[in-house]
Amino acid sequence: MNLGWLALEVKYLGRAREFYVDRLGLDVVRESETDCVVEAGDTELVLRVPSDVPRGGTHVHYAFTTPRDEYPRWKEEFEAVEERDFGAYSSLYFYDPDGHCVEIGESDASGDGIAGVFEVVFEVEDLERATGFYTSLGASVTDRGDDRRRVRLDAGGFDIELWEPQLGIADGQGGVHMDVGFEVDDVAETVDAVEEDALASETTRHGVRLRDPDGHYVTVY
């Protein structure tokens, strides 16, 4: 799978646009009175004011990737709430104006600035139930938390973390009201694999939109 889009709910569109465009250097793809879509590598980040459903995630913790030689620049740009060394790479954690916990992690990616999104965190009520849904969707479990109730899954082009309600690194939280788009190899096959466990499904102009067992909107296309 590839992460096609991640929607974030924001209070003030102009303020959010300034943060992601002027400070993070992301390019605007399109915008309207209710949303502004910016590009982070192959992923679209949708900044959306409360106006309709799906709303876009609140309290979302997610992670950008950046080339190693760009990482020091981000350390100078942002006063990190926390920095972590994970051995092969380090990450900065800070907050956007709407309280989303943003991570920037160094990687072997090429290019300048933000190269993409490599992790998204969902808050779930029942960890095993949610894990079953996302493994049926095509992700595979790579890690289970020893000290925290979490499961990490490899979705191919990015990682998904599922957290029961709790605070993580830098007091990050799993996102609620998530709205994401996953590019998959076979839409019909993917829908068949998970539709029985989905709360609802409908065909939209973007693909087939599912509601996972926790009410998050997941569109496969």
Image: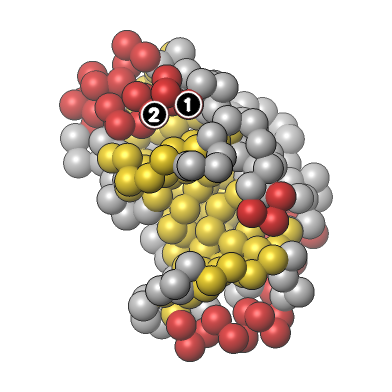
Which residue is at 53% across, 71% downward?
85
Q: Position of residue 146 (x, y in %)?
A: 48, 42
Residue that label 2 marks:
131
Mark 2, secondary structure of its residue: helix
Q: Position of residue 168 (x, y in %)?
A: 63, 47
Which residue is at 73% across, 59% downward?
95
User: Is 170 situated left or right of 109 in this image?
Assistant: right
Crowding near pointer 2: few (<14 within 10 Å), some, many (20+)?
many
Q: Position of residue 6 (x, y in %)?
A: 52, 46
Q: Position of residue 86 (x, y in %)?
A: 48, 67
Under mark 1, the amino acid is: Leu
Under mark 2, the amino acid is: Thr
Pick the residue in front: 83 or 21.
Answer: 83
Crowding near pointer 1: few (<14 within 10 Å), some, many (20+)?
some
Pick the residue in front: 143 or 190.
Answer: 143
Vertical position of residue 117 compared to residue 111: above or below: above
The color scheme shown is secondary structure
Tell me if I can see residue 20 in this picture. no
Residue that label 1 marks:
127
Mark 1, secondary structure of its residue: helix
Label 1 – label 2 distance at C-alpha:
6 Å
Which residue is at 44% across, 72% downward?
87
Quadrant in which the C terminus is drawn: top left
